[in-house]
C-alpha cells in the first residue's frame, strides 16, 4: 500500500506522477501517519527596532509578566495618541532573514561554503508565517495565497507575494478593523516588560515596527528547514528552559459565551494558534479574551501539546497530521518543479480555496526577490 500512497496527493494528469502540474489540497489525501518533524533548534535571533532597522541581537526581547486572571485591560487605550503603526505597504520579503544569514553564515554551515557544493546546508529558507499558511491550507476557505520560490545554489527560498484580493482588503479596511488590529499589540504591552527587573508600561507608545525574531532549524521528513518567526516574549525566570521552549505567544480573542462560539474557537482560532507556535517549538499561548468594547475579561494559557486533545470532541475538526503532511507534500512538489537554479528565476505557486495548487515560471525582474547584495555575498 505504500507505493499507492506515494503520489496520492497529486491529481493524475499524466501517467508519470513526476509530470503532474498541480497539487491537490483535499484533506482526505493527507490523513496518514504524522511525518517526522524534528524538535526545532534555535540557531540565532535578530531584532527590528522602532524604525524597522535590523540588529543581529536580542535587544527587542520582552519578558512575560503573568497578569491577573480577570485583568480588565482596556485594549482601546492609546489607539489615537500612543500608536505608531508599521507601514504594511512596504514589502520586506526575505530581506531580514537574508541579512541574518549573511551575518551568521558560519553558524549554519560549519564546514564552510568551499567544502560544500551548496552555499547553505538547508533545503528551504522562509518565514514561519509562510509555513503557517501552508499548514492551514487544507482547512482554509476564505483566503488564497501566492508563494514565490527561487532556487539558488541548491537552496529553495520561499517568499510570499500579496494577492490582489489581499491588497484590496488591506487598502479598504474599516476603521473598526484598523482599531481591532491594534488590540493584539496593546495586550502585549500590558503583559510584557522590557527586562526581568521592570514591569509592563501600559502608558507607553505601542510601535509595531519593533520585533524580536527567532531563527530556527528543523527537518520535516526529508526537508531541512531554516525559518524565522516573530516571538512575543519569553519566560522571565532565568532558570526557564532554553529557547524556543521558554517563549510565550500572546493572543487576543473574543470572549466565549455560547457553545457555538466555543466550537468556532476550537475549529478556526486554535488551528491558527497551533500551526503558528508548533512550527518553531513555542510551547504555550497566553490568550486574553476580550468583550465587544475591547476589555480583556479573562486570561487563559493554552499548551500547544494539549490543543489536539482539546479539539477531539469537535465534529469534523482539523487534524495536525493533515496540516503537516500537506506542508511536506507541498515542499516535495516545490523540489520537483523548481529545477532551474538561478536568482533571476522565480516559480510562482498559486492557490485559491477549493482549487488545486498551480504554478508558473517567471524570468522577468517583476517577481525576483533575492537582493543583489545577498547573491554577491553567497557567490564569493
Ligand atoms: P492577535 O493575535 O491578538 O489577534 P501575533 O499574535 O502573531 O503576535 O500578532 C500580533 C497582532 O498583530 C495580532 O494580535 C493582530 O492584531 C495583528 N496581526 C497579526 N497577524 C495579522 C494579519 N495577518 N493581519 C492583520 N493583523 C494581524
Ligand atoms: Mg507576535
Ligand atoms: Mg501574538
Image (cartoon, rainbow, N blue to C red):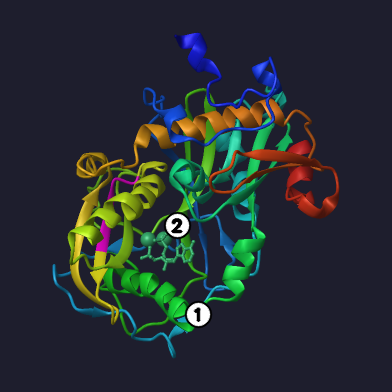
Q: Is residue 294 left or right of residue 83?
A: left
Assign a secondary structure to mark 1.
Answer: loop
Q: Nearer the viewer, residue 146 or 109?
A: 146
Q: In percent of the image, x 27 and y 51: which residue is there?
A: 266
Span highlighted in magenta in the image: 282-287
Q: Quadrant of the N terminus?
A: top left
Q: Residue 72: where, in percent of width, then height?
A: 19, 78
Asked where in the image residue 10 lies, by quadrant, the reply is top right
Q: Nearer the viewer, residue 299 or 337?
A: 337
Q: Residue 290: where, in percent of width, then height?
A: 25, 72
Q: Is residue 199 left or right of residue 50?
A: left
Q: Nearer the viewer, residue 323 or 132?
A: 323
Asked where in the image residue 81 lies, by quadrant, the reply is bottom left
Asked where in the image residue 265 lies, by quadrant, the reply is bottom left
Q: Residue 39: where, in percent of width, then height?
A: 37, 32
Q: In percent of the image, x 53 and y 55: which residue is there?
A: 143
Identify the residue position indicated by label 1 in the image.
Answer: 174
Question: Magenta stretch mostly in which secondary structure?
Answer: strand
| Residue 235 visible in the displayed image | no
Identify the residue position indicated by label 2 in the image.
Answer: 58
Q: Residues within 10 Å of mark 1 (few under 14, many from 20)?
A: few
Asked whether residue 6 is drawn in magenta, I would say: no
Q: In percent of the image, x 55 and y 73: which residue is there?
A: 86
Report the mark closest to the observer, 2 or 1: 1
Amino acid at each position: 500500500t505504500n507505493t499507492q500512497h506515494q503520489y496520492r496527493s497529486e491529481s493524475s494528469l499524466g501517467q508519470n506522477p513526476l509530470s503532474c502540474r498541480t497539487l491537490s489540497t483535499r484533506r482526505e489525501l493527507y490523513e496518514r501517519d504524522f511525518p517526522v518533524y524534528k524538535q526545532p533548534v534555535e540557531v540565532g535571533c535578530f531584532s527590528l527596532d522602532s524604525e524597522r532597522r535590523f540588529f543581529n541581537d536580542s535587544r527587542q526581547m520582552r519578558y512575560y509578566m503573568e497578569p491577573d486572571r480577570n485583568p480588565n485591560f482596556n485594549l482601546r487605550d492609546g489607539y489615537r495618541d500612543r500608536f505608531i503603526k508599521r507601514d504594511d505597504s512596504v514589502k520586506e520579503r526575505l530581506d531580514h532573514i537574508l541579512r541574518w544569514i549573511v551575518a551568521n553564515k558560519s553558524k549554519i554551515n560549519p564546514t564552510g561554503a568551499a567544502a560544500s557544493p551548496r552555499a547553505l546546508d538547508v533545503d528551504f529558507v522562509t518565514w514561519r508565517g509562510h509555513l503557517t499558511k501552508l499548514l492551514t491550507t487544507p482547512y482554509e476557505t476564505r483566503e488564497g495565497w501566492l508563494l514565490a520560490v527561487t532556487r539558488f545554489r541548491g537552496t529553495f527560498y520561499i517568499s510570499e507575494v500579496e494577492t490582489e484580493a489581499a491588497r484590496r482588503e488591506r487598502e479598504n479596511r474599516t476603521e473598526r478593523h484598523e482599531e481591532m488590529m491594534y488590540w493584539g499589540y496593546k495586550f502585549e504591552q500590558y503583559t510584557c516588560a522590557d527586562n526581568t527587573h521592570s514591569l509592563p508600561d501600559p502608558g507607553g507608545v505601542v510601535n509595531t515596527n519593533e520585533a524580536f525574531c527567532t531563527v530556527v532549524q528543523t527537518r520535516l521528513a526529508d526537508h531541512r528547514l531554516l525559518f524565522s518567526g516573530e516571538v512575543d516574549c519569553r519566560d522571565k525566570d532565568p532558570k526557564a528552559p532554553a529557547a524556543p521552549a521558554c517563549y510565550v505567544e500572546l493572543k487576543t480573542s473574543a470572549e466565549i459565551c455560547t457553545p457555538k462560539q466555543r466550537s468556532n474557537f476550537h475549529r478556526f482560532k486554535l488551528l491558527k494558534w497551533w500551526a503558528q507556535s508548533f512550527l518553531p517549538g513555542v510551547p504555550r499561548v497566553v490568550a486574553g479574551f476580550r468583550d465587544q468594547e475591547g476589555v480583556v475579561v479573562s486570561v487563559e494559557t493554552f499548551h500547544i501539546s494539549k490543543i489536539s486533545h482539546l479539539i477531539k470532541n469537535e465534529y469534523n475538526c482539523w487534524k495536525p497530521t493533515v496540516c503537516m503532511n500537506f506542508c511536506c507534500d507541498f515542499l516535495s512538489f516545490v523540489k520537483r518543479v523548481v529545477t532551474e537554479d538561478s536568482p533571476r528565476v522565480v516559480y510562482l505557486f498559486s492557490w485559491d480555496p477549493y482549487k488545486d495548487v498551480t504554478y508558473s515560471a517567471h524570468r522577468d525582474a517583476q517577481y525576483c526577490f533575492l537582493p543583489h547584495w545577498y547573491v554577491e555575498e553567497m557567490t564569493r
